[in-house]
Amino acid sequence: MDADLRFTFISERVEDVTGVPASFHLGKTREELFGEDTHSKKWAALNDLIARRLQFKNFQYDRRGPDGKTQFINISGVPVLDDAGNFASYRGVGNDISAFKHALDRASKAERNLITAIESLKDGFVLYDANDRLVLCNSNYKELYRLSAEIMQPGVSFEEIIRYGVERGQYADAIGQEESWIAQRLVDHAKAEREVEQQLDDGRWVKISEQKTPDHGTVGIRVDITQLKHAQRVAENANKSKSEFLASMSHEIRTPMTGIIGMADLLLMSKCSDDVRSKVEKIKGAAIALLSIINDILDFSKIEAGKLELETIVFHLDDVVNDAISLVEERIRACGLKLSVDIYSDVPRAFSGDPTRLRQIFLNLLGNAAKFTHQGGITLSAVPSRNFDGTPSVEFRVSDTGIGIAADKIDTLFQEFTQADASITRRYEGTGLGLAITKRLIGMMGGTLSVDSIEGEGTTFTFVIPLQKAGSAHEAMSTTRHIVDYVSITQLNILVAEDNRLNQMIISSLLEKYDHNVTIVDDGSKAVEAATVGAFDVILMDIRMPEVSGIDATRMIRSGGGVSSRTPIIALTADVMTDHVTNYFNAGMEGFVEKPIDKLKLLSEINKVLGAEVHRPIYEDDREAAPAEEGAANDDEQNFEDVNSFLRTLGLDENSTPSGRS
């Protein structure tokens, strides 16, 4: 431009950019080329610089391009002076920056959209760069960490932010262990591999999820899980209440059943006629059936709560099968059914696993078969098998010739508290839990259960479970000889803490029949006092007693010092919930026997805690038939008095009314 700011030269490139030939510009001022545009407010700063004949840089303006679209031009210019130092002209350059401006606009729009999206998140969002300095975070992130929000500015390091929060009590879990908490938080943040739950000062809970970005930054999400934690606590409390209720119900039902079964056992051990013995056995059988229902409910509840655990011990398969058979054989044969067992010779016998639960599976399936079979027979068979991944397993089948199951009812078999239909429930009774528990136990063992049935012809239940072979067959040598009783070798002094008078009589009568000296107390505090002043070989401790519980009494005895603090203590209780049993051992007890009392288990447990064969086992195949005492079997008058005594104890004889239980 000359001194009058008229174009004296412009490159041919201007036509490519603007669509106007270079020659058109020559001799014209910018105002003449652009008209009123150059007098707008936007141009005022440039016009001022030019009026003062000063340099200008990167002035940007837009115009309509040759294609009708907006075009962006960037211009710069410097004044040219003559030899006398007077202004002579301007020279400068111009660039078409449309592509750059469009890209910048798109980037700005994308950034605005991203920020809008991040701000719209209900959760807290944060981004740290490779140097662990804050890049950006949304308002919800700052709202969660209100005490730290002030310092949350781009460029501030993650450590600075959490230290700022710790100093102001932002994190409830950090109080009292600030430095160790910060160190662990920095480790978790650096790894960004696991979710972390964090409690804040106002009681809210936040779940932290972090992930590394390709450029080694860290992106994080903070989710407010306060409501979820509250719901979790409610569920845990409800589950705890359910467990406590079940424990209470178990205790309240097992306690009177201990009296019924215990008195029945004492009567069976006395001199009674065949007729009386038969009636007492029916009483005991009914009580055991009720106990079976209670055990089903407790087992199912423990499975539901995830508190039933499988043990892993070495066992012999023949023992487990024979034990299960011995418990159902009489019932099956009494129904006129044939019972067959067919275990293939190539099925290993020594395994490592949970024999108690495997026995329970056999019992449930055999008992179910017996319930629905009226003629023919039941077969238990086992063949070697392999899982889909090639690992060895055993396939068991329980087949019957019973009533079968309609095809449309099979899907309901394994549902809780359900039998095939209402008529089945009415006719055959039961909780409907046996098969549901069986399926879950098999699942816990890593196996599968299936059923095939033809209505009117029979049913076959098939389950396949992986069984780990034992290292040595000798470890699981078959011990199929069944213990039917014990004979006392050593006379013991036994302290029994039991608040129920009927149970006191049953336990003392049972132990005295094995020549032991028994001292009875009815409260935990009295048990502590008796243990301190007396010399006892073993203590049988009830758990739920007035004033001082069995657990507290055990702790007192263990902490008292002296000889009594080392006396073996066995929990003798109707409270059999797994968590509670663990508490018994944690309190210092060495053994556990559940009520109703199985005398064989009790005597065996005494042997175990004393580490000696105080009671020598009598096996079924060794016991010689003892001659009946003269006149004992037919002494009906004495039999009648024994039964009446039993009924009077329960408050149920013809001259009394049922007594309430306090």
Image (cartoon, rainbow, N blue to C red):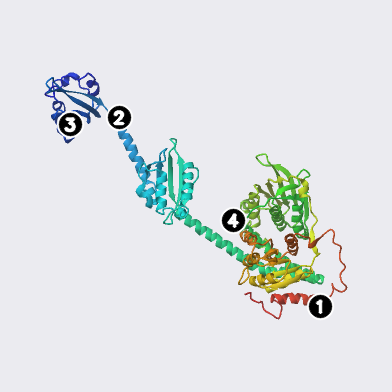
Picture layout, residue 543 above or below residue 103: below
**Badge 1: how crowded within 10 Å, few (<14), some, or many (20+)?**
few
Q: Report the Cα–Cα distance between label 3 and label 1.
A: 131 Å
- Which residue is label 4 attached to? 304
SS state under label 4 = helix
Picture layout, residue 325 above or below residue 66: below
Residue 381 in percent (x, y) is at 75, 48
Residue 198 in percent (x, y) is at 46, 51
Which quarter of the figure has residue 244? Answer: bottom right
Residues at circles 1 and 2 in contact by the CB criterion of under 8 Å: no
Residue 100's disc is 2
Q: Nearer the viewer, mark 3 or mark 1?
A: 3
> Which amino acid type is marked by label 3?
Leu
**Badge 4: how crowded within 10 Å, few (<14), some, or many (20+)?**
few
SS state under label 1 = helix
On the rendered image, what quadrant is the C terminus found in?
Answer: bottom right
Q: Report the Cα–Cα distance between label 2 and label 3.
A: 22 Å
Q: Report the Cα–Cα distance between label 2 and label 4.
A: 65 Å
**Badge 2: how crowded within 10 Å, few (<14), some, or many (20+)?**
few
- Which residue is label 3 attached to? 46
Residue 637's disc is 1
Q: Nearer the viewer, residue 636 or 356?
A: 356
Residue 157 in percent (x, y) is at 40, 43
Q: Nearer the viewer, mark 2 or mark 3?
A: 3
Q: Earlier in the sequence, mark 3 or mark 1?
A: 3
Q: Earlier in the sequence, mark 1 or mark 2?
A: 2
> Which amino acid type is marked by label 4?
Glu
**Badge 3: how crowded within 10 Å, few (<14), some, or many (20+)?**
some
